[in-house]
Amino acid sequence: MSEHDRDLAQMEQDQGVRHRAAQALIQEAISEVTPQGRDLPAADVVELLAAALDARGIGPQPRHWLEAVASEVSSGGTYVEDPAAAPERVMPA
């Protein structure tokens, strides 16, 4: 089981810190490709996203996740992986 599959409450403190840092980098990559990815085919967005993640040192992600993000982005939506790292999206109170 990877640390991404575990509940944050079960992680050691340093694992939780690493997880939150990785989530913030993933959200940063998503936020970077979203403006240019709107109205592009999802396959193109997958490539942009993979490159943005790689540039941040985030290893390969599951294809189905990349496709889900790309589908949301290419249709004009905003995919939020980490609400704390996505200030442009207002979360309900």
Image (cartoon, rainbow, N blue to C red):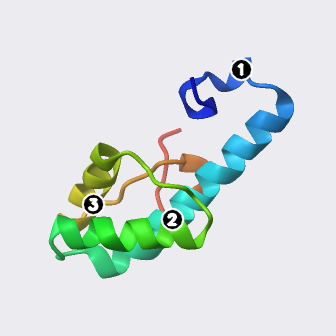
Taking 32 as reference, is 11 left or right? Answer: right
Between tags 2 and 3, which lies in front? Answer: 2
Density class for disc 1 (Cα within 10 Å; few <14, some 14-19, many ≥20) is: few
Q: Residue beneath label 3, please?
A: 70
Q: Residue at x 21, y 57 (%)?
A: 71
Residue type at mark 1 is Ala
Vertical relation: 34 (above or below) 66: below
Residue 50: give x, y in percent of width and height: 41, 65
Taking 44 as reference, is 24 left or right? Answer: right
Q: Nearer the viewer, residue 59 or 83?
A: 59
Vertical relation: 6 (above or below) 17: above
Q: Residue beneath label 1, please?
A: 9
Q: Circles 2 and 1: CB distance less than 8 Å?
A: no
Density class for disc 3 (Cα within 10 Å; few <14, some 14-19, many ≥20) is: many
Q: Secondary structure at mark 2?
A: helix
| Among numbered discs 2 and 1, the one appearing first in the sequence | 1
Residue 19: give x, y in percent of width and height: 68, 42
Q: Circles 1 and 3: CB distance less than 8 Å?
A: no
Q: Which mark is residue 53?
A: 2
Q: Residue at x 32, y 70 (%)?
A: 47
Query: Real-space Cα distance between discs 1 and 3?
Result: 30 Å
Query: Real-space Cα distance between discs 2 and 1?
Result: 26 Å
Residue type at mark 2 is Leu
Q: Secondary structure at mark 3?
A: helix
Q: Nearer the viewer, residue 11 or 80?
A: 11
Taking 28 as reference, is 64 left or right? Answer: left
Please identify the quadrant where the N terminus is shown.
Answer: top right
Q: Quadrant of residue 13?
A: top right
